[in-house]
Amino acid sequence: MSTVLQESQPQIASSLDWKTYTSSQTDEALFEWRRLEDRLGDQGIACSATWTECWIRHYGDLVPFKILAAQANGQTRGIVLITEGVEQKDGPIPVHTTHVGTAGEPQIGSVCVEYNRLLIEHGFEVPFFRGVVDTIQADPTWEQLRLDGFDELELAAWLAEFPDASVQSRDSKYFDLKQARDENKEILSLLGKSTRSNIRRRLKKYGDLECEWAEDLDQAASIFAEMIEMHQARWQAVGQPGSFATGRFRAFQEEAMVRLFAENRVVLFRVRHEGATVGCLYLLREGERLLDYISGFAPFDEKPSPGLISHYLCMERALQHGYAAYDFLVGDKQHKDNLSTHHNQLCWLTWKRPSWKAWSVEQLRRAKRLIGK
């Protein structure tokens, strides 16, 4: 949600008129979605009409979905995508899940949504949230509710409704560009001593580096295509398929990149050394915040510390462009630790509807833990 729910905040007393759009009414729903987004401005990539439409186009035939909207005085005040999970499991046990936002696809080929949220006009947060919860609870078909990639501040209201839910929290590390700008400090000066030393040594060893911040679609497409090649090569070298191994994921990302670039909501960045690419970065833009979404780097034996150097140089350029934060999202990689100064908590919530099956799965887990002691 764009604003954390608080009972003390002003609420508009008028009742909301609810409408559920099925897959055959997607165009009508997205029209309303864009009208609401145009009024509210940038509320984040994950709840944007473009991201949602691209997801529906490439996953909507696989993952059942509906769009829930609420109106007051003839205008849409809140809207959300609700999906039915496909190939979801609780340990080894298949389960029927329901998800909020662009989630619920099989793990292989998932878009891995982060900074997920509802799109709600200010003043309608509580009644809209209440209606979404009621709609979800009224559906008897699912066994687990899953909220994927929500900021911890967005979870307070959900936890009040589902107090016994389990929550997995992960650090989303970021560098505070605003702090550097406000204090008139260089990025290097705010990093750890060993990181500063390592970056200086690497830059000296590299010598001349060419940096590209895509200014037009042709340049963006060139960086994006090379990023895919480098990303796949690195993962396949260690026996993993890589994110772009599935056609759905690749098609989704290709369309989303083009459309979001046209809306100035993504950044493509490339670093080259002596004619060879060191790294390519694909970042999502949320207001003044950049999100490190996907990357591709040269092999370590060809280019030293390619991730560290590529991100550092992109951070320098982001500082010049006026961004407030450079967010590495979740994931355990050394350059994220080295280049970050702060962190947010992103959360994955699971609430299990009471049932004989849920009870049995939990007993199996307890037995396994006891055997393992």
Image (spheres, rainbow, N blue to C red):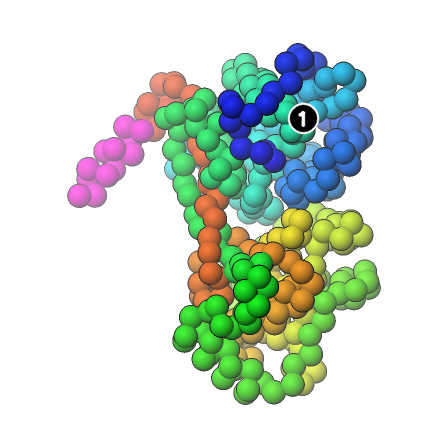
Frontmost residue, 142 versus 324: 324
Position above or below: 189 against 3? below
Was residue 372 drawn as part of the magenta stretch in this picture? yes
Pointer 1 residue: 78
Position above or below: 232 against 346? below
Frontmost residue, 307 versus 192: 192
Please tell me whether mark 1 sits on a helix, a strand or a loop.
strand
Tell which residue pokes out farthest to the front in this image: 183
Q: Residue at x 40, y 36 (%)?
A: 167
Q: Residue at x 53, y 33 (%)?
A: 4
| Location of residue 205 in the rendering, given as x and y in whole percent from the top left corner | 54, 87
Q: Quadrant of the N terminus?
A: top right
Q: Residues within 10 Å of mark 1 (few under 14, many from 20)?
A: many
Q: Main secondary structure of the magenta part?
A: helix
| Location of residue 216 in the rendering, given as x and y in whole percent from the top left corner | 81, 62
Callout 1 amino acid: Gly
| Location of residue 341 in the rendering, given as x and y in whole percent from the top left corner | 47, 60
Q: Is residue 6 visible?
A: yes
Question: Is 240 left or right of 208, judged from the image as shown?
Answer: left
Q: Quadrant of the C terminus?
A: top left
Frontmost residue, 344 versus 224: 344
Tell which residue pokes out farthest to the top in this image: 15
Question: Is 230 left or right of 50, judged from the image as shown?
Answer: left
Tell which residue pokes out farthest to the left in this image: 373
Q: Residue at x 65, y 52 (%)?
A: 288
State the image quarter where residue 292 is shown: bottom right
Q: Residues in magenta?
A: 362-373
Q: Is residue 180 visible?
A: no
Q: Residue at x 69, y 34 (%)?
A: 61
